[in-house]
Image (tube, rainbow, N blue to C red):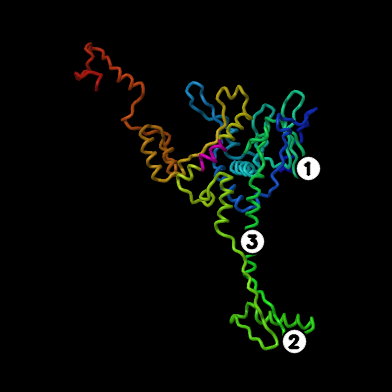
Amino acid sequence: MASFLDKLFKRKKEPPNAERAELMGTGSATFTPFSGNAYESDIYRSAIDAIARNAAKLKGKHLVYSKKTNERSQGDHNVNQILQVRPNPYMTAYDLIYKLVTHYFLHNNAFAFLQKDDKGNLQAIYPLSPQNMEFLTDPSGRMYCRFLFADGEQVTLHYSEVFIARRFFNSNDLLGDTNTAILPTLDLAHTQNEGLEQSIKSNATIRGILKYNQVLSPEKLKEEKKAFVDDYLNVKNNGGIAALDSKMDYVPLKMEPTAIDDKQLESVKKKIYEYLGISESIVNSTYTEDEWAAFYESVIEPLSLQFSLELTDKLFTEREQVFGNKIIFESNRLQFASNESKTKILKELVPMGLLTKNQALEILNLPPVEDGHKTLQSLNYIDEDIANQYQGGRTNEGNPDGRDPDGSTGAGQ
């Protein structure tokens, strides 16, 4: 990572008289990657992958919300291009989110460099994989992040240039806690895998004692043993029968390796899944509609909210935020609903004019059509102003008695 970031960081200089930030009650704020090798566990890795590949479907958007109507409009095209297509020359938007989410659950801290031009406009986003990071402050109180990478490269970035996402945000005021709580379970999972491997090897090996009824020299014993193994313990011995004379006896040793209980395996797997907040059905993609909804609301939505708030604060000034500039991450949740649920939703929303033709087609995973931006609406629903006029009665010119030309009154219909 640091190799191709060298050019980006070469202009970055250490702020003068910067000191390590000391926090009230928690001491210094220093990040070091989790060294428990959690990613080497197949269970832990597959679980993180399930979260990351689903979270990577989130679509980042720069939107501007109107203070009067709360309607939203598309923001800067360049920012949306970075968030939705290619955040930097080396990866896609999917890659960026996938990597950040993986770091988030592996280290409980995820970092990215927000490259900006001289005017503060976003140019690119680079995920960072530091070996160490510490917070610094200068005499004026401004915050900085000093990163140390694997190749020895060190760079100090202003806090506003660094995207930070934290998990288990508890004991430290600026960083998430480590994953030491899951280490005993990961060690147990590793031990189980080792036990299974040894059990398989033991069952695949024939063990026994070859006893000769006469005294033989060590060299002769080795020759006789080799001859016995080649003749009778070879895979080509399809009969499975050994013929021996009185000069030797073969006594097989029965090895009964201890098998690991399936309940023990499932218990360890369940602990890891619960630690990450997901279920096995999410990992192996056998989830139901309700299981997906629970996963989205409990895991994906908190991530999207955290990413949205962090980027909004780091990319826009306070004044720009007051004028409605926001970064949001969202996805079409209805795409994962059953066809029955989609049909019910469309029956309710389309008559009210809440969806365009193409929005309805997108929910059904169908391609857009020409003039698909138009909405369809039932005549059973009317405009609010018309409803108020109707409820208040109508006065018709030329009809002092308040009757319509057909002789009926406007109210009470």
Q: Which residue is mark 2?
A: 214
Nearest the viewer among 33 and 383 is: 33
Answer yes or no: is residue 115 visible: no
Q: Main secondary structure of the magenta part?
A: helix
Mark 1 or 3: in front is 3
Residue 146 visible: yes
Task: Give residue 152's mark.
Answer: 1
Q: Residues within 10 Å of mark 2 (few under 14, many from 20)?
A: few
Q: Which residue is mark 3?
A: 195
- What kind of residue is marked 3? Gly
Question: Which tag, 3 or 2, sits closer to the chain's start?
Answer: 3
* Residue sitting farthest toward the top: 400
The reply to whether the magenta stretch includes residue 92 is: no
For numbered disc 2, what is the local secondary structure?
A: loop
Residue at figure coordinates x 51%, y 43% from the top left? 295
Mark positioned earlier in the residue sequence (1 or 3): 1
**Bounds of the magenta segment:** 295-304
Q: Residue 314 location in percent, x, y?
A: 64, 30
